[in-house]
Amino acid sequence: MARDQHGTPKPRVQQAAAAVAALFLLLGVLGFIPGITTGYHDMTFAGHTSGAELFGLFQVSVLHNALHLLFGLAGLVLARSVGGSRIFLAGGGAIYLGLWLYGFAIEFSAEHSAVNFIPLNGADNWLHLALGFGMLALGLLLSERAGTGGRLDDPFDRP
């Protein structure tokens, strides 16, 4: 179990946020490794024309991988507090649900338009849907005192 500097166990929401952030960092790095990313030589900076696919399934680009890395770094910073962890998980979940809607709209409308600046395919869309709901659920439901009628967080500026 993860512990803070005083040896106290970290709340589950912080552990979950750190794990999700680490996953995003890992995926961002893996997206730049030939072999794990098929069609690596066809990777573009941005846009729907990128021929690279992480694990041969999820369409990626340099921008897409960089966004995963930045999202992971932001998650690690926010996971240092309970409130930040909830913001990362619930807010990130909402962002990924929005990205799913964006990908869904792109897939069924103008797939090859200039609006499709992040390469997304059907597998990406299903992954974004799962990530969105999963992160949102973790951020909203994972609390040490959820459902007890008490405060979910102790204010950091008061004892």
Image: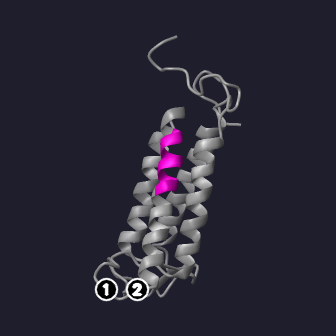
Q: Residue at x 60, y 58 (%)?
A: 133
Find out whether residue 93 is within the magenta segment: yes
Q: Residue at x 62, y 56 (%)?
A: 134
Q: Residue at x 67, y 32 (%)?
A: 146
Looking at the picture, how far across and down is residue 132, in whole percent?
55, 59
Looking at the picture, how far across and down is residue 113, in whole percent?
31, 86
Q: Is residue 146 above or below residue 95?
A: above
Residue 10 lies in quadrant: top right
Helix, strand or loop at mark 1: loop
Q: Which disc, if any, is residue 113?
A: 1
Which range of residues does the magenta coloring cover? Answer: 85-94
Looking at the picture, how far across and down is residue 106, in whole percent?
41, 80
Q: Which disc, if any, is residue 109?
A: 2
Helix, strand or loop at mark 2: loop
Q: Nearer the viewer, residue 111 or 59?
A: 111
Farthest residue, direction top: 159
Report crowding for label 2: few under 14, some 14 to 19, many 20 or more residues within 10 A (C-alpha): few
Q: Residue at x 58, y 53 (%)?
A: 135
Asked if one can make out residue 35 in the rendered structure from this viewpoint, the answer is no
Farthest residue, direction left: 114
The N terminus is located in which quarter?
top right
The image's colour scheme reads one colour
Report the Cα–Cα distance between label 1 and label 2: 9 Å
Q: Nearer the viewer, residue 63 or 130?
A: 130
Looking at the picture, how far across and down is residue 57, in whole percent?
57, 82
Q: Amino acid at mark 2?
A: Ser
Is mark 1 in CB contact (under 8 Å) with mark 2? yes
